[in-house]
Image (spheres, grey):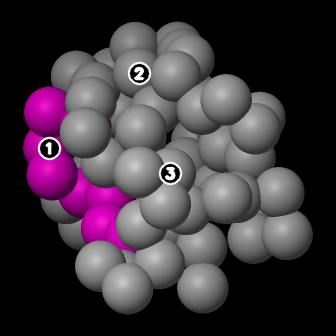
Amino acid sequence: MAAQVDPKKCTMCGGTVQPLCVEVCPDSAIRVQDGRVVVTEFLCEDCNECGQVCPDRAIQVPLEKVSF
């Protein structure tokens, strides 16, 4: 299972065009589509870089999957 984004918590880093999670993802697995953050599951390597920088705490990676 890849990183999961809670759309109810995500504010797109306060409304920025390029949220922090998109910038830090080393696998380019996160993108903005239709005004929301989307994770491409087969690209995500569960590193949790996105979850670490998310100011809204809207991204979760199941602990058993974290690879750092």
Q: Residue at x 29, y 79 (%)?
A: 63
Query: What type is the residue that disc 1 sits on?
Result: Asp
Q: Earlier in the sequence, mark 1 or mark 2?
A: 2
> Which residue matches tag 2?
20
> Which residue matches tag 1?
56
Q: Earlier in the sequence, mark 3 or mark 1?
A: 3
Q: Does residue 62 sit above or below 19 in this rendering?
A: below
Q: Are marks 1 and 2 in contact (CB under 8 Å)?
A: no
Secondary structure under the numbered disc 3 in the rendered image = loop
Q: Main secondary structure of the magenta part?
A: loop
Q: Which tag is nearer the camera, tag 3 or tag 2?
A: 3
Q: Residue at x 49, y 60 (%)?
A: 67
Q: Which residues are magenta?
A: 54-61
* Residue 7 % position (x, y): 36, 64
Q: CA distance from mark 3 to mark 1?
A: 18 Å
Q: Does residue 8 sit above or below 43 in this rendering?
A: below
Task: Give the quarter of the image for residue 40.
Answer: bottom right
Q: Does residue 51 sit above or below 5 in this rendering?
A: above
Q: Residue at x 67, y 29 (%)?
A: 26
- Name the residue nearer the viewer: 43 or 16: 43
Q: Does residue 13 sit above or below 3 in this rendering?
A: above
* Residue 47 % position (x, y): 50, 51
> Which residue matches tag 3?
47
* Residue 61 % position (x, y): 38, 70
Secondary structure under the numbered disc 2 in the rendered image = helix
